[in-house]
Image (cartoon, helix red, strand yellow):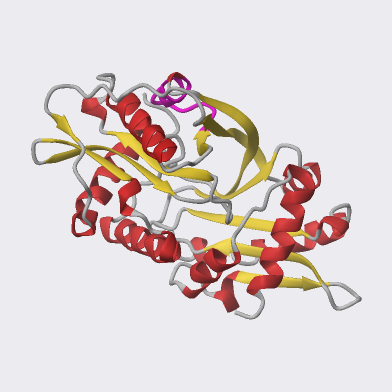
Amino acid sequence: MADVSLVADLLNRRSQRRRGQNQVQVEALARYWEGDEIQLARDTQLFIGDDGNLIGFACVLDPRAPFVEITYQVATNPDASSDSHLWDEMIRWCSRKDELVLGKAPEGVSVYAKAAAPIEDEDRWSAYERAGFRRVRVEHRMQADLGGSIPKPAWPDGIVVPPFDLEELPALVALDQQVFRDHWGQVERPFEEELRGWKEWIHSQGEDLDLSLWFVARAGDDLIGYAICEPQIAGDTSRAYLAGFGVRADYRRQGIGLALLHQVSRTLQDRRFQTVELDMDSENLTGASQVYERAGYVTIRQNLLYEKLLRDGTDITVRSLD
């Protein structure tokens, strides 16, 4: 764990060089490393330069059932960004972990390696392309300014948003699984795997966990929509992050999503946040982008999403709504 500050410093210096903002908070990264989602000895690798300083970091995200994808994450010290050999070596290290999924994936299904890179980070995405990755999507980071007038939420009759209690987490996880069944790239996972992932994420929040920023809409006893915020982004407490958002398919196009977003913005404005941000697939299959735009969100930057087919077979990820 002594390496966490070095890795956070590398990631933040790279992000500051390109975007003028930090990427991670040291304490949050440390909590993530302490959790069950990652095994440091197996899933991470430091790359040290001739001078003994950290010049690169690689990791693979812990594959989960049904073991059909593995995610690569690589980054260099900004001063080593032009070193194509370093990039290639980090990706080769990640590829040696492909067996974590290939050895467990169900017979006959497709298996993918996935990766992402900021659109302006040509050194990184060029390295993925040299390694055989294919650009498949663009992810938008969107932001809403909280300085102006924000409409009062207009809730349909019978829809309420009472305070949320973590005892209802299993019901919320079940709702999340329903919401994302029609999202591109989604893989249906066992409920217990999803619940474990949510609990790990909650642990990683530490003292930043703020249930007053969890807005869960209900119709009678049913949970039908949610918006979950984190009260800082990489230590910047003027910016909030909308980490989770969705409405159950049979309750969409009734104004519930827009009402949730207005509820989020008004609450954050009352608490003196300046902006709120979220990430969205540029080709979202559910029409969420129009709801975000109506709530005042605009794109501020983009990430390129990549895939590499590791084993051909039946694709069990969502690719369309057909």
Residue 20 falls within the magenta-colored stretch: no
Residue farthest right in this picture? 50
Magenta stretch in the rendered image: 281-293
Q: Is residue 167 left or right of residue 113?
A: left
Q: Residue at x 21, y 38 (%)?
A: 161
Q: Number of marks in the image? A: 0
Q: Quadrant of the N terminus?
A: bottom right
Q: Is residue 280 visible?
A: yes
**Quadrant housing residue 79:** bottom right
- 283 shown above or below 72: above
**Quadrant housing residue 104:** bottom left
Image coordinates of residue 99 in percent, x first then y, are: 55, 66
Residue 289 falls within the magenta-colored stretch: yes
- 199 shown above or below 176: below
Front residue of 309 and 77: 77
Front residue of 42 and 265: 265
Q: Quadrant of the C terminus?
A: top left
Q: Residue at x 67, y 71 (%)?
A: 5
- 117 shown above or below 91: above
Q: Is residue 270 left or right of residue 125?
A: left
